[in-house]
Amino acid sequence: MFDNLTERLTQSLRNISGSGTLTEDNIKETLREVRMALLEADVALSVVRDFIERIRTQALGAEVMQSLSPGQAFVKIVFDELVKTMGDANETLNLHAAPPAVVLMAGLQGAGKTTTVAKLARFLQERQKKKVMVVSCDIYRPAAIRQLETVAGEVGATFFPSDLSQDPVDIARRAIAEAKVKFFDVLIVDTAGRLHIDESMMGEIQRLHAAINPVETLFVVDAMTGQDAANTAKAFNEALPLTGVILTKTDGDARGGAALSVRALTGKPIKFLGMGEKTDALEPFHPERVAQRILGMGDVLSLVEEVERKIDKEKAEKMAKKLSRGGGFSLEDLLTQFQQMKAMGGMMGFMDKLPGMNSAAVQDAMAKGAPEKMMKQMEAIIQSMTPLERNKPDVINGSRKRRIAAGAGVQIQDINRLLKQHAQMEKMMKKLSTPSGISKMIKGLRGLQGKAGGKGMPGAGGGLPPGMDPNELAGLLGKQPKK
């Protein structure tokens, strides 16, 4: 998400961040580039106009012009205005109500509403330890009811049955009564979607809202529709008292216009981002972190949270103890690391959140899927080895390499590259070779957040995973390290 916007903005801001002085001329040129970047990202024109005017007014102020580093002060203004445009801070769900807290989901057909119900149920169960029930009030599409039942089963949420012969209000009331009797904390109500906004659709959902009085009314919208997403949200907000928005399919949206337009046009906060098809691909929306990503500064805090949540701490501590006792970092251990990486969304999901990943070379490699291809190839090579070869790479001679290459469908040089990268990884892992290795890694990642900015003024970006230098990163991307 934001790939195109990040590329354009970071380039234009890089030109001015090193300026010793700010003048109306260089501000004017930079603002023109920022305006074009936002319009190309499909941000609503009115939002762009207000955004640029606020930056211009502040940039020409005496405080900035007299700053010791006016170029960086200008970047800070852009950062602060991005955060302000998207909502200042994360707004969590308001579930402070007598159980069950009812959450009503609204949106157009095809936005991913039913899948998002399951994602939200999983989020509430796993991260907030809530007991969740879901119900479908879509009496027009039998497939929608069956779909909700299926995805509810996948995430372990309780499904309340309904059918096409019932009235949506009756379905919802019966579900609430059932949830009360069985002591559920939250009831998520899925509603019928339409291909476009029409009076009958709005009338039905208004009637349903009035009958069940939900504590949260969330509008689910496809981020890839750009400023149309914001306009649709605005239309729904005029008919319903929305409390928040969930942007779906953001992993396929390279522009980011919806995220920058929704709050300004509706006045309602974006509460979650749908980041993929899997049921765990739902993340709280943090405006400050998103602004850092837009400006190429990474999103280290989200990465830290993901590491803490998804990494297998038992395996990590076991490996750390092994290294602390002088045991080597084997190819079998490297294979385990790849599996851990997959749990966090793969190499690209990991790198995308790191500061300093917006250079042209790295972005080009990521756009071509180089990190994922390399990781799959290395997995195939390791899986073609015998247990002895995995645990003692030094025994891999020429004949063994030929056999492994044939088994994995690769060339001899690919085997050599893997062995070289493994040696680099072993050096990195030895730097974390204490029983508290995982805590040390997380502390190192938090240190990157300080370099990337944290709260307040963002720094110049930059920074790689703890212990990794640019040559090691180049190796992981399948490029030749610098001599």
Image (cartoon, helix red, strand yellow):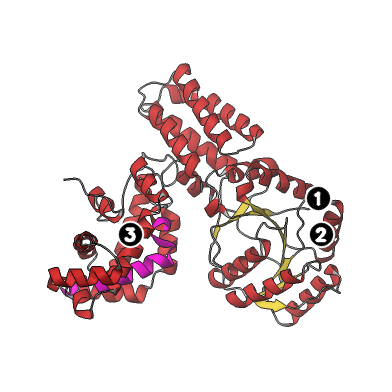
Q: Give me the residue at 77% from left, 67% from top.
A: 141
Res. 22 image quadrant: top left
Per the model, the C-alpha gap separating discs 1 and 2 is 9 Å
Q: Mark 3 points at which residue?
A: 374
SS type, badge 1? helix
Q: Give me the residue at 20% from left, 45% from top.
A: 482
The kind of residue on which mark 2 rests is Ile
Tell me if residue 384 can be seen: yes
Would you say the magenta stretch is mainly helix, strand or loop?
helix
User: Which comes sooner in the sequence, label 3 or label 2?
Assistant: 2
**92 with respect to 315 (left or right):** right
The kind of residue on which mark 1 rests is Ala
x, y percent for residue 322: 22, 75
Q: Name the residue under label 1.
A: 239
SS type, badge 2? helix
Res. 54 image quadrant: top right
Q: Give me the residue at 80% from left, 71% from top.
A: 172
x, y percent for residue 344: 43, 64
Which residues fall within the magenta stretch?
324-349
Q: Which quadrant of the figure contains the C terminus?
A: top left
Q: Is residue 238 above or below residue 414?
A: above
Q: Name the residue under label 2.
A: 205
Per the model, the C-alpha gap separating discs 1 and 3 is 50 Å
